[in-house]
Image (tube, rainbow, N blue to C red):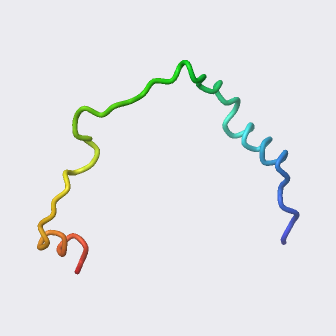
Amino acid sequence: MAGQPFTDDEYAFLRHVRFGELPPGVRPEERVELTETEARGDRPEPYDDPVQWHLRHGA
């Protein structure tokens, strides 16, 4: 059963029903520049040992 694809307005309505009202956008004067001063804690340090590389990637 193939129906008509949704229009942009219908998609907008469905997004509003699912997620509600979006918060207001951040104004340019409210933005701040981020700088990283420490290593990221969410990623491991790069490790360039070829043996370890082969073990990790199944080569």
Residue 29 in picture, x, y percent from top left: 55, 19
Residue at (83%, 61%) from the top-left corner?
Answer: 5
- Seen in the picture, residue 47 relative to 39 is either above or below; the reply is below
Q: Residue furthest right?
A: 4
Rendered residue at 26%/41% (across/down): 40
* Image coords of residue 53 (percent x, y): 18, 70
Please state, as top left, top right, bottom left or bottom right, where the C terminus lies in the image.
bottom left
Q: Position of residue 26 (x, y in %)?
A: 59, 25
Picture residue at 51% right of the left edge, 24% below the top: 31
12 is higher (above) or lower (below) than 30? below
> Which of the 4 quarters of the picture holds residue 25?
top right
Please tell me which residue lies in front, 16 or 58: 58
Which corner quadrant of the image does residue 14 belong to? top right
When the figure is inspected, residue 40 is found, relative to residue 51, above or below; the finding is above
Quadrant housing the N terminus? bottom right
Pick whichever, 26 or 3, lies toward us: 26
- Would residue 2 appear left or right of 46 to someone viewing this image? right
Residue 22 rendering spot, x and y as whole percentages: 67, 30
